[in-house]
Amino acid sequence: MTVVHVAPKGRGAHRTLTAALAAAPAGAVVRIAPGSYEESLRLTRRVTLEPEAGSGSVELRSIGGPALTVTAPGCVLTGLVLRGADPAEVLVRVADAAGLTLADCELSGGRVEVTGSASGASAVANTALGLDDDLSAELSDPVDGGGVLLLRRTRLGSVRNTALHLTGDARARVEDTLIHEVEGIGAVLSGSAVLLAEGLRIEETSGSALRARGNGRLVAANCVLTGVGRNGVLVQDAAEALLDACRIERPAGSGVQVSHQAGAELTDCRINGAGGNGVTADEAARLTARGCRVTEPGGHAVLATGAATVTLADSEFDRTGATALHLGGQAHARVTGCRVRGTGDHGLAAAERARAEVADSSLDGFVVCGVHVEGEARAVLDAVRVTGGETGVRLRSTAEEPSELRDCWVAGQRRSGVEVGVESSAALAGTRVAEVGGAGVAVDTGGRLRMAGGTVAGAMGSGLVLERGAAAEVRAVRIEDCQKNGILAGEAVTGTFDHCDLSRSAFPALHIGKGADVRFRGCRVFDCGQDVGLSDGAQPVFEDCAAVRVRTAVLPALADRTGAPPPGPLTPVSSDRPDAPAAEGAPTAGAADLWQQGEPEPEPETLEDLLAELDELVGLDGVKRDVSGMVKLMQTVRLREQAGLPAPPLSRHLVFAGNPGTGKTTVARLYGRLLKALGLLTRGHLVEVDRSALVGEYVGHTGPKTTEAFHRARGGVLFIDEAYALVPAGAANDFGTEAIATLVKLMEDHRDEIVVIAAGYPDDMSRFVTSNPGLSSRFTRTLLFADYTSAELVSIVEHHAQRHQYELTAGAHRALTSYVERIPRNAQFGNGRTARQLFQRMTERQALRVAELVSPDSAQLIQLDEQDLQ
């Protein structure tokens, strides 16, 4: 290695850097004595410049134009200070096909610019999209493509317009670097440029922190963007951005904005205090956010307009200035496992022709509506919890397809739980509305309602209100404890009400308006002063209806040998009572059949097929043995019962002890289906709940909530996740103990109708089981779910790949095995969930890679290789 010295004086040293570079051969190291050098350098050969006395001792000042121009690959600057003459001009330029590493440097007074050409763009994008990629080879060897820059532990500041600018097919990797004090944008990439950033901090920019345009690709991990004058990240045109564990603090505009046909994927990111929206997607943009949190934006947490597509999973949106999730235009949002808390307007709003699909999520603490739908928009809510606010769900859309609520919970509103607007339509299935200040469900003039199963309870107004000209099909609904009517059918209302139960309403349970064309079949009224109130000229039709403990009755009294029965046992009064015997002529199918009449019944599952499905699960050897043993035991019990012999004492309830992602829910679902195949359960379905679904927020609320959840699971399995949360450590007076006491009684009253599985961390489950003597006597068997081994995690990824028609190359299998073995087994480790997320990210990275190919063949479309690993 040749070493060339630069010093103001002394023998054997060049007096200027320019002279030293002219004398230095390729591969030489230029060592510079301390001092300030006013020169503009041009690196035409691969050289390394380093200070003789350590970082910061050498300053290079531009005499006009860039202080440094690089036209050769493999150049390195370490520990130097570079000062530009004009903050709006170029300080460092890396030319097409050149390469530069800047390590431990300080740059100010001008931008860093990396240029490239339009050729070779696909190859560049394919090789550079991975945070584990090492660009050192491209820096040291000739580059077939644009310029390459590597910034490590470097500061870049006092710049105007743009601090870091990548064009063409340029590539840059930035690690542990600070960009600050920028009168403009922190970093811009355009053309097909690629920027990989890890540990990057951008502070105090008047424009956006990061901007990707054209076909650029931005990959950022563990980056922090603060003090941003506009957007934290701006993605435009057809650019793509991947953000992992990034933090965006108080940008003046949006935290992330995606426009045109661009795409962005956010994982485990935090956006706090945005002056505008937390996240914005417009035109034909695509946005995915997983495990993210958006807190205190001045506008919406998420705004999607135009034809944008938004996917939100396992994310939280807290304390938004406006609506948390707002959709307009023809935007389409899929929301799963998310939580919205504290909004200045609505929790979710869909307007114009937008579409929203929301599942397993909660909306709480909004000012106006939990869900507001208008224009021709449509929302489908599946297992969504809506609590508080003025109105729970307001549907004012004229879309051809009705908005739907399936197995939802709407409670605690100041006004109505669910409102269906003028000429609007809605379909509710298995939904509970409780403790609202007005009507439980209100249908405005000309509105249309289909409602199957579920409950309306504790409404301060009427349970179900149908205004003039509304139409309704209501089946198997329970309405109870309303302060006005149970059902109020106004003037000219049309509809049918099948097998509904109404109890304890303060006004007549049924009020029928003038000219209403309504028919009640198999309905019952319990414990009311009056069962039916009629306006002048009202002529409802009643078939097989009855009154029980009603002082002033129009309907015939229900015969009772030992006192009138409580609501529920004679007909399938709601989807929460799937196993109740049907009265003569009553439908025996569940409430969901209202939406699927005419479909054939599925073939019953065989015990052999279910045991084979259990055996196919990866790992879980001990669990499989335990479940198979219990199945054999229960087969014997079943045979004894069929032979007229008494069954031995047997508890079917179980404790599943294991860390998250170890397959507890999967096995619980299979266990229910196995018991159904044995004839020991009528349905074998699984209802999954946690503390929030069982424990109320005030005195008298917990018992009904727990009972409601229990009845939904009758005939199947009630799966209580994190069951120990019902017994908080150190909390003497907690509503969880009431939930447990209610469960114990219900388990005794319905011991042959249900299986209860309590699940959670192994170390905490004993606290739950020993909290009540009734639990310890019923939960006598614990199944231990061990963490998956590395080999089993790899098998799970391969299983997902086979299911979705992907193939792992041999290199991908080796890299995956090595990657999985390095995953820390800490509190964040998700076992099977980690494997599933890993497979999903591999397919997403493969999709980005394949999208850059001109004509990919079928083999390329299904192959996952090592570069698809993060």
Image (cartoon, rainbow, N blue to C red):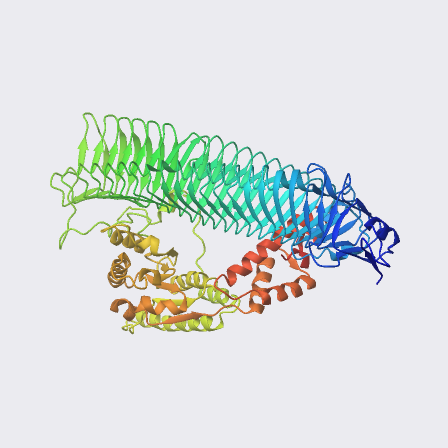
The residue positioned 32% from the left and 51% from the top of the image is: 576
The residue furthest left is 551
491 to the left or right of 366 = left
The spot of residue 245 in percent (x, y) is 55, 52
The spot of residue 552 in percent (x, y) is 12, 38
**Pick the front one: 27 or 724:** 27
Q: Quadrant of residue 375?
A: top left
403 to the left or right of 501 = right
**Pick the front one: 333 or 238:** 238
Q: In which quarter of the image is residue 797?
A: bottom right
The residue positioned 57% from the left and 68% from the top of the image is: 790
The spot of residue 427 in percent (x, y) is 38, 39
Residue 297 visible? The answer is: yes
Residue 579 visible? The answer is: no
The spot of residue 162 in percent (x, y) is 66, 39
101 to the left or right of 762 = right
**Pick the front one: 111 or 390:** 111
Image: 168 above or below 761:
above
The residue positioned 60% from the left and 48% from the top of the image is: 242
Image: 34 above or below 630:
above
